[in-house]
Image (cartoon, rainbow, N blue to C red):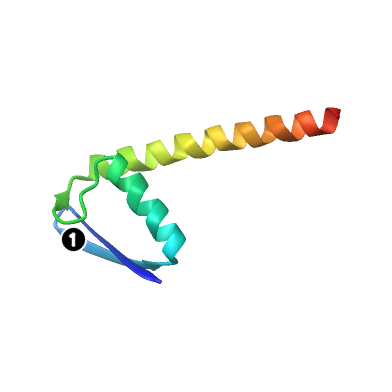
């Protein structure tokens, strides 16, 4: 387990995540502009969520296409 902490509008949030998930979350949040050592504005966190939602939607579409392709074989 790894401790992940960030500050949002002056309030510090801490969660414990499994190592692999913590690494994924940290990389994704950093890419979206989240800083783990300073305060973050809420809109930056919203942007990070929307970025992740877009990636999830794309993955779901790719999985559906792969399943459809496999069904035709």
Out of 71 and 45, give the one closest to the viewer: 71
Considering only vertical position in the picture, is 56 above or below 10? above
Q: Residue visible at 48% across and 36% down?
A: 55
Secondary element under disc 1, as helix, strand or loop, is strand
Q: Residue visible at 13% across and 53% down?
A: 38
Q: How many marks?
A: 1
Q: In the visual, does 68 lie left or right of 26? A: right
Q: Residue furthest bottom?
A: 1
Out of 16 and 19, give the one closest to the viewer: 19
Q: Residue visible at 46% across and 34% down?
A: 54
Q: Residue visible at 85% across and 27% down?
A: 72
The C terminus sits in image quarter: top right
Instruction: Give the x, y percent position of residue 4.
Output: 31, 63
Quadrant assignment, res 30? top left
Instruction: Give the x, y percent position of residue 10.
Output: 14, 57
Q: Residue furthest right?
A: 73
Quadrant assignment, res 33? top left
Quadrant assignment, res 45? top left
The N terminus sits in image quarter: bottom left
- The residue tagged 1 is 11
Q: In the visual, does 24 lie left or right of 63? A: left
Q: In the visual, does 72 lie left or right of 18? A: right
Crowdedness near tag 1: few (<14), some (14–19) or many (≥20) residues, C-alpha within 10 Å: few
């Amino acid at each position: 387990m790894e401790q992940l902490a960030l500050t949002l509008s002056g309030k510090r949030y801490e969660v414990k995540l499994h190592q692999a998930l913590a690494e994924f979350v940290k990389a994704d949040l950093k890419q979206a502009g989240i800083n783990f050592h300073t305060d973050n504005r809420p809109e930056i966190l919203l942007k990070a969520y929307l970025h992740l939602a877009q990636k999830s939607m794309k993955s779901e579409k790719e999985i559906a296409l792969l399943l459809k392709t496999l069904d035709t074989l």
